Amino acid sequence: MFDVYRNDKRDLLVLSTGSAVPVLYSAHKWRKSRKRVLKVSDEIKSAVQTQGYYVRSLRATKTRMIKTRMIEIQ
């Protein structure tokens, strides 16, 4: 199983159950998801096994927003 955390900057942190937040990311305020996570993608699973954690930004960047709007217009 996995523990999933979010912070106020909409970053996602995935750890194996019971692991501590890595020192590199401990300065941020992380909120633990209340839901149990049993399955994750193979990419996340391999990253957690090798590095001990997986981090991804959930923020919408300007380029993503522009691409989305261009698709909507077409």
Image: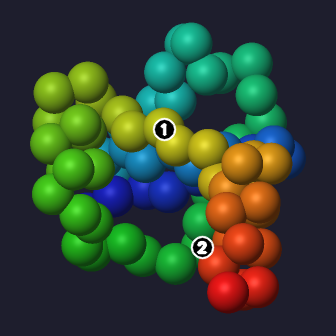
Residue 35 on image: x %, y %: 52, 78
What residue is drawn where x is 67% and y is 63%? 67
Picture disc at residue 34: 2
Distance between the alpha carbons at the discs numbered 1 and 2: 18 Å
Q: Nearer the viewer, residue 37 or 40?
A: 40
What residue is drawn where x is 36% and y is 34%? 53
> How many numbered discs?
2
Is 48 on the left or on the right of 72, as rendered?
left
Q: Amino acid at mark 2?
A: Arg
- At mark 1, the secondary structure is strand
Q: Quadrant of residue 58?
A: bottom right
Residue 51 on image: x %, y %: 26, 24
Residue 48 on image: x %, y %: 25, 39
Q: Amino acid at mark 1?
A: Val
Q: Nearer the viewer, mark 1 or mark 2?
A: 1
43 lies above or below 24: below
44 lies above or below 21: below
Mark 1 or mark 2: which comes first in sequence?
A: 2
Q: Which residue is mark 1?
A: 55
Q: Quadrant of the N terminus?
A: bottom left
Single out the residue that lies furthest toward the top.
Answer: 24
Q: Quadrant of the C terminus?
A: bottom right
